[in-house]
Amino acid sequence: MEQWIKKMNEATFHLDEKNPHEKHPYLKEYLSYYMFDMTEFDQYRCGTMMSHNQNIFIQAFLKEKSKGMVLFVHGYLDHSGGLSRTVNELLANGYDVVTLDLPGHGFSQGESGTVATFDKYVDAVEIGYQFICDMFMPTKLFGVGHSTGGAILFHAVSEEKVELKRLVLVAPLYFPFRWNLVKGAIRMVGKVIPKQKRRFKKNSHDQAYQKFIKQDPLQVKWLKTDWLRAMEEWHKHIIYCSTLKTPVYFIQGGKDTTVDYKKNVLFYKQKCHHLQIAFFPAGRHQLLNEHDEIRHLVYERMTSFLDKT
């Protein structure tokens, strides 16, 4: 284990403390390891808030003057550090950014890579939202979520636990790729083999990124059937959620083999009054970490949508 990870896990940070990375070398090492651009923010905060007796790790990247604030949520098996390039891009375009690690991911507590019910993810996002409202009271708050993070943000807004001006969903989860086959496998062998070692599939054309995540010490390393069962239960409830009136921008890649994007697009079309779709035929699941040509176009579309308010 990296020394800075050990120290980060042992440390207690307070979200009302400004720029703790200036006093704690291991926190600065974390920011450097994941290539957060420290020249792009004027103030940094991090700390935890409690949800279901588990600490949820929250970070705030703040500018002296901003266009608004973005609540940014990562996907399954990932963490906030894995999406640092998007944080940097949002900051460079004038937005404050608040991130949180979902339960069982990154520096948030919980069993690694699984959850009893997706409601715990929704509650964690609501905790992050409450922190933003209490601490910053932004006049413009937007949401950006990748994969499971997008689905959870959507769910939280549909239940009116989170209020956003606009929402960007990047390859959001509904059905996973080849879900019927996966369901069958769970029923046949799930109890006998409750987990399996993660195979890092090619989810981006960026070879440097592919190499990095395989070495990333905070990536979840095991896939657990309990998580898939929790997602299957979530399907039974989310189908009845309220339709969103919030403007939604859906960004999707045509080479995605993590989610079943064709079925997912149909679901979100039914559930969003104001939905725009940007389709990238060559893009894989990690659109926010794709090679430069695709990634910069994704960023351009995303920030253009946010800038409309």
Image (cartoon, rainbow, N blue to C red):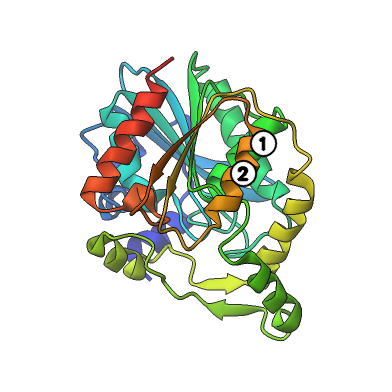
Q: Is residue 43 left or right of residue 162?
A: left
Identify the residue position indicated by label 2 in the image. 266
Q: Is residue 256 left or right of residue 207?
A: right
Residue 18 visible from this viewpoint: no
Residue 196: which quarter of the image?
bottom right
Front residue of this view, candidates 218 and 140: 140
Residue 43: which quarter of the image?
top left
Residue 112: which quarter of the image?
bottom right
Q: Residue at x 45, y 53 (%)?
A: 79
Q: Which mark is residue 208?
A: none
Q: Amino acid at mark 1?
A: Gln
* Residue 40 x, y percent position in the rendering: 24, 32
* Residue 72 x, y percent position in the rendering: 47, 38
Q: Quadrant of the C terminus?
A: top left
* Residue 51 x, y percent position in the rendering: 67, 44
Identify the residue position indicated by label 1 in the image. 270
Circles 1 and 2: CB distance less than 8 Å? yes
Q: Quadrant of the N terminus?
A: bottom left
Q: How many marks?
A: 2
* Residue at disc 2, secondary structure: helix
Q: Is residue 220 left or right of residue 187?
A: left
Front residue of this view, candidates 98 and 92: 92
* Residue at disc 1, secondary structure: helix
**What's the CA distance linking mark 1 and mark 2?**
6 Å
Work out whether 88 lies above or below 117. above
Q: Residue at x 54, y 43 (%)?
A: 150
Front residue of this view, candidates 35 and 197: 197
Front residue of this view, candidates 221 and 135: 221
Work out whether 250 lies above or below 83. above
